[in-house]
Amino acid sequence: MRLPIIKLNDVYKSYSYGDKRIDVLKGVKLRVAPGEMVGIFGPSGSGKSTLLHIISTLDFADSGYVEVLERVIDPKYLSEDDLALFRRRHIGLIFQSHNLFPEMTAYENVYFALRMRGHTHSQAHLRATNTLESLGLGEQMHKNVQMLSGGERQRVAVARAIAVGAEVYVCDEPTGELDRENAINLMEILVSLAREGRTFVIATHDDRLIPYFDTVYRLEDGVLHKVAKKEVKHGKDAGDTQ
């Protein structure tokens, strides 16, 4: 049996807005094995993004235990510089906001991410080109990202994340702006990476993705439950969009 590389025990998280406190995560427990494809479903506002931020070290639990790749994620033990280095080396981030450099082309966004990881010019050029082409962006790669559609920018963000070769990928609605053909192509690429040992935690409303997941959870009212795939397919958030 494969030992989990993501462990969450009794994770709680809340936010305060003035005098009001909102409990977002309530005792979340999660185990993810190497190479596993995990889908997290749930209505908007259920805490999916918060959970992803905690797994990716962009935020911290108020209480509970979080471990990623045998590293305890706790600000008492890790400085901001430590966390930034850990993310750069081990975590791939695919979020709805894309976070692309708007003054760069699609190719440059991927190329410079690879150069920052220590790849040579020729390595970064080849990897950036091949990854963008695999996602159907061969003709768009030298266009400024501001000239691309929302779906194309989303694929550039995915290309940048998978090109750098992280061990754990945290994805928030990666197919939210993609048509069926591109969504299927993307998921087949992610599955092939999972077979090589890469691990994916994907928050989504897109029930087209259900067949690609090894394990499916539903997050609602701050509580995470493992569910059967058919329960999500016919759940009240199936086909919902943000």
Image (cartoon, rainbow, N blue to C red):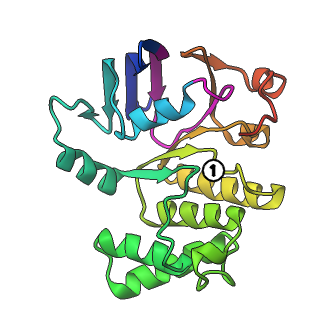
Residue appearing at x 54%, y 55% in the figure: 193
Q: Which residue is labeled 1 in the image?
A: 174
Q: Which quarter of the rendering shows the N terminus?
A: top left
163 inside magenta stretch:
no
Residue appearing at x 38%, y 26% in the figure: 7
Q: Position of residue 117 (x, y in %)?
A: 31, 68
Q: Which quarter of the rendering shows the C terminus?
A: top right
Q: Quadrant of residue 98?
A: bottom right
Q: Position of residue 173 (x, y in %)?
A: 64, 45
Residue appearing at x 48%, y 50% in the figure: 198
**Residue range (magenta):** 22-46
Q: Is residue 26 visible from the viewing direction of this image?
A: no
Left or right: residue 237 versus residue 148 is right
Badge 1: residue crowd in 10 Å (few <14, some 14–19, many ≥20)? many
Amino acid type indicated by mark 1: Pro
- Hey, which residue is sitting farthest front in the picture? 18
Q: Is 101 placed above or below 53 here?
A: below
Q: Position of residue 137 (x, y in %)?
A: 67, 76
Q: Quadrant of residue 139?
A: bottom right
Q: Who is closer to the viewer here, 30 or 151?
A: 151
Left or right: residue 118 versus residue 30 is left
Label 1's element?
Answer: loop
Left or right: residue 52 versus residue 117 is right
Q: Main secondary structure of the magenta part?
A: strand
33 inside magenta stretch:
yes
